[in-house]
Image (cartoon, grey):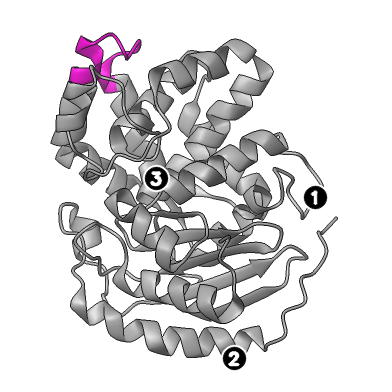
Amino acid sequence: MEGQAVAFDVDLDQLLREVADTARAEAAEGKVADYITSMAELDPSKFGLAMVEMDGTEHVVGDVDEPFAIQSISKVFSLVVAMQRAEASKGVGNELWQRVGVEPSGDPFNSLVQLEQERGKPRNPMINAGALVVDDVLLDHCDDPAGDITKLLTDLCDEEIGIDEVVMTQEGRSGHRNRAMAFLMSSFGNLTSSVDEVLDVYVRHCAISMTARQLARDSRFLANDGVDPGTGRRILPGELARRVAALMLTCGTYDSAGQFAFHVGIPCKSGVAGGILGLVPGEGAVCVWSPPLDPSGNSRAGRVALRELAERLELSLF
């Protein structure tokens, strides 16, 4: 069961090719993340752009079938699984939002300053500290949190999704600031599991390996009021799906969320391997991948690609 097709008045395949040509040039101004060896070795010329409509029609250009570690994009799906548990047990939802906020941080995604000032309560679940709290909640309600996240992703795109074990190991060795955040939150009583257990979940879902095409496919339910348009299965109640999208819009691109809202105008979530996921409510999802980043940790070419798409298709929510 697929959703209804959206009739655009342009040739989307040609448009994506034109957008890709414009965006690729921006990659030269960026820098590939180098704190993990596997990411430092990413080819900066790689570029993939995938747009998937509600009826399943796919428009792609470039390296859309090359897997990469989705990194912070995984925070969207860890939150979705936590919200699923919240729906099954109302107490989980109350617990989650008492422990993590919903406000933009305005600070880098791995900042400790705000976290200490606010007594261990992260501003939102899209920054590292907030995702760690979500993972702690998942540990209380899932036997295998990372496995539940990969199962959701596998079911949504009907292709096996797994974890890049090399990236996972390297991330675990380099995550000193994440460990510091976890200990700080634990000192304020905002973690119930051990720091090691929480960090293990975190590095596992950050190391999930997917392609731009798969991410666009998997995210359509968030643009479709919580219903997977491929199967008709409800993944989240509509109200909760809209809340995830709202958090992506206001908090999903680190301390550049305001710029994304201003220039792109759709909910987005980025990751430091160069992926950016975007939702077009009622129409579909788009994912762009280009490893070189801007100073905020967002893909430079990816931001340009989404801006061009939003302007030329008038996708902005505003």
Q: Residue at x 55, y 40 (%)?
A: 244
- Three-letter residue code for mark 1: Thr
- Up the image or down, 33 lies above or below 311; here it is above
Kindly state the secondary structure of the residue where label 1 is placed: loop
As for residue 189 lying within the magenta part, the answer is yes
Q: Upstream in the sequence, badge 2 or badge 3? A: 2
The magenta span reads 183-196
| Residue 242 position by quadrant | top right
Left or right position of 114 against 58 = left
**Is disc 1 surrounded by few (<14), some (14 to 19) or many (20+) residues within 10 Å?**
few
* Residue beneath disc 1: 231
* Residue beneath disc 2: 14
Give the distance between the C-alpha atoms of the residues marked 3 and 1, in whole angstroms: 29 Å
Question: Looking at the picture, how far across and down is residue 186, in whole percent?
Answer: 24, 13
Q: Upstream in the sequence, badge 2 or badge 1? A: 2
- Three-letter residue code for mark 3: Cys
**Is disc 2 surrounded by few (<14), some (14 to 19) or many (20+) residues within 10 Å?**
few
Q: What label sits on residue 251 in the rendered view?
A: 3
